[in-house]
Image (spheres, rainbow, N blue to C red):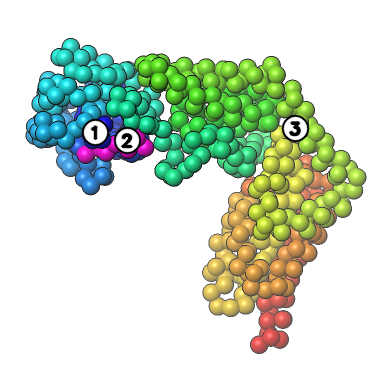
């Protein structure tokens, strides 16, 4: 089973399950074939602009083939015109099959009476194994005496799961070892063990937009005109475990929509366990969906059944484990983390804020921020939508970076620095992120670097003084509204900003002039 050919079209029901993007559909097949050490040498595929169930002769369509390993469109026009062109390629495909260049055939929503007639006749005569989808077409092909080794519907399938199913059937028939390719990196050893795909930092980072959306709603809900959004805020807090579960399941299994569905089910059942419960449920769902999916393929279940049951059962089983067993434990673990943070702050909030401010720049420069600080921020935000370390993040990182950048806009040390700093300060103030924009200036001057650390510590001390909770990743004019003390946060922001600005101006103008 070395050489494989692909024929067919974007189909009717297939069009709604990935067929509308013909190039992506075909590319997924190439990826899985390569994982099984099979080569796709010949392709004749029609991609229409609408489902074939309602397509007309005037519907737009494109004929695709493969050239030097790449899927390429070779002709575009109306469906009638493309069908005529496909007939010519059909004759060539038949010749390739007759000459023994094709060991297996993948068929998707084919036309055995017209556009694919010659190729299918050749496949029947040579009795090469055929796998495919498309109810009516596959029934006609089987009735014609073809060697169909796997056939299924398209409902509930995705481009990836269909491709895995097709290639797994061909590989088993040909005695070829096949491990599905779930990553763009063919050298990714993690595919052999889904447990190695578990990345807590990655899950947290990817889930961050959900927390920021919650913080935005919190800020808006404090405006009298939008006070009704307080109910939405409560809904978003409850949904956080679901978001994290989906991200975790997708990260571990990467079976497209199947893993997403499993994550949603597991996350819904893990809500009572908080974000730790959601993460556990999602990880279990990702592992389970992989195991069930491959086992059902080995048992030769229909592809539709594989998708529906693998996603549904994996999500349900994982969610129930968290719901009845692990949820309360996960909830207590989250509470312990939050209690530890609150205990440290309660002991001496100014000292806690100062230490956090002094350490936050070394943490982000050393790669510790995303691995340790950000998860803690998210744990704090899970309950109230705001965080002590989140406020320190905004004040000691974002505002300090903004102060450094703005100083270089108005008082640059060298020509060109203003143009470099302007986008940075805009993003700092407008989006509450991109503190990396200050790196070039900090690394080029020990005074600016030291000023950033001192400003961050001073800003953190002010956060502790006002005992304020907040978050970064918001426009600076909105951040105070998402905090527990708008005035305290504004004062803390201004202290850190002004301090960083002044130190940078002194470094650039006074000390810079003395050095010259």
Q: Residue 450, image x and y in percent?
A: 74, 68
Q: Residue 109, image x and y in percent?
A: 24, 23
Residue extending furthest toward the right: 347
Answer with mark 2 or mark 1, whichever residue precedes in sequence: 1
Residue 435 sits in which quadrant?
bottom right
Tally of numbered discs? 3
Q: For the N terminus, which image quadrant? A: top left
Rendered view: 163 above or below 318: below
Query: Badges 2 and 3: C-beta atoms under 8 Å apart?
Result: no
Residue extending furthest toward the top: 143
Q: Which mark is residue 4?
A: 1
Q: Is residue 323 left or right of residue 88?
A: right
Instruction: Give the mark toward the camera: 3 or 1.
Output: 1
Q: Residue 97, image x and y in percent?
A: 14, 31
Q: For the C terminus, which image quadrant? A: bottom right
Q: CA distance from mark 2 to mark 1?
A: 8 Å
Asked whether residue 126 is in view, the answer is yes
Residue 439 sits in which quadrant?
bottom right
The answer to which of 224 and 56 lies nearer the viewer is: 56
Q: Which mark is residue 334?
A: 3
Q: Residue 238, image x and y in percent?
A: 66, 26
- The residue that appears at 82% across and 55% down in the rendered structure is 355
The answer to which of 91 and 224 lies nearer the viewer is: 91
- Per the rendered image, the range of residues in magenta is 35-41
Instruction: Assess whether residue 252 is covered by the magenta stretch.
Output: no
Asked whether residue 60 is in view, the answer is no
Residue linked to disc 2: 33
Mark 1 surroundings within 10 Å by alpha-carbon count, few (fewer than 14), some (14 through 19), many (20 or more): many
């Amino acid at each position: 089973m070395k050489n494989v050919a692909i024929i067919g079209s974007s189909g009717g029901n297939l069009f709604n399950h990935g067929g509308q993007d013909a190039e992506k559909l075909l590319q997924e097949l190439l990826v899985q074939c390569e994982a099984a050490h099979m080569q796709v040498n010949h392709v004749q595929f029609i991609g229409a602009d609408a489902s074939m169930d309602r397509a007309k002769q005037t519907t737009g369509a494109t004929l695709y083939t493969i050239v030097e390993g790449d899927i390429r469109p070779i002709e575009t026009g109306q469906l009638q015109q493309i069908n005529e062109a496909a007939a010519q390629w059909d004759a060539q495909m038949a010749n390739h099959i007759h000459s023994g260049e094709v060991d297996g055939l993948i068929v998707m929503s084919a036309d055995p009476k017209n556009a694919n007639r010659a190729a299918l006749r050749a496949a029947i005569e040579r009795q090469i194994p055929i796998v495919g989808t498309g109810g009516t077409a596959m029934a006609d092909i089987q009735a014609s005496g073809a060697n169909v080794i796997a056939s299924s519907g398209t409902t509930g399938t995705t481009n990836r799961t269909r491709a895995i199913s097709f290639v797994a059937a061909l590989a088993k028939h040909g005695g070829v070892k096949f491990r599905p390719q779930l990553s763009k990196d063919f050298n990714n050893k993690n595919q052999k063990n889904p447990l190695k795909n578990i990345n807590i930092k990655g899950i947290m980072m990817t889930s961050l937009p959900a927390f920021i959306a919650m913080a935005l709603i919190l800020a808006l809900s404090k405006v009298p005109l939008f006070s009704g959004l307080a109910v939405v805020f409560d809904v978003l807090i409850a949904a956080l475990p679901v978001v994290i579960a989906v991200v975790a399941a997708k990260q571990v299994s990467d079976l497209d929509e199947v893993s997403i569905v499993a994550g949603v089910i597991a996350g819904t059942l893990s809500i009572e366990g908080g974000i730790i419960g959601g993460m556990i449920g999602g990880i279990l769902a990702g592992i389970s969906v992989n195991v069930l999916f491959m086992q059902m393929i080995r048992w030769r279940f229909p592809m539709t059944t594989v998708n529906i049951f693998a996603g549904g059962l994996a999500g349900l089983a994982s969610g129930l484990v968290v719901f009845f067993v692990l949820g309360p434990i996960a909830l207590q673990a989250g509470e312990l983390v939050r209690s530890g943070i609150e205990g440290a702050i309660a002991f001496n909030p100014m000292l806690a804020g100062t230490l956090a401010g002094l350490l936050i720049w070394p943490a982000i420069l050393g790669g510790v921020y995303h691995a340790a600080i950000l998860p803690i921020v998210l744990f704090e935000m899970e309950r109230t939508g705001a965080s002590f370390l989140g406020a320190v993040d905004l004040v000691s990182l974002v505002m300090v970076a903004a102060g450094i950048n703005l100083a270089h806009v108005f008082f640059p040390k060298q020509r060109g620095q203003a143009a470099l700093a302007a986008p940075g300060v805009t993003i700092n103030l407008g989006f509450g992120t991109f503190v990396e924009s200050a790196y070039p200036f900090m690394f080029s001057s020990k005074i600016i670097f030291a000023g950033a650390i001192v400003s961050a510590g001073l800003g953190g001390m002010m956060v502790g003084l006002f005992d304020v909770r907040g978050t970064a990743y918001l426009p600076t004019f909105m951040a105070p509204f998402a905090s527990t003390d708008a005035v305290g946060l504004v004062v803390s922001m201004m202290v850190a900003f002004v301090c960083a600005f002044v130190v940078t101006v002194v470094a650039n103008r006074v000390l810079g002039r003395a050095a010259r």
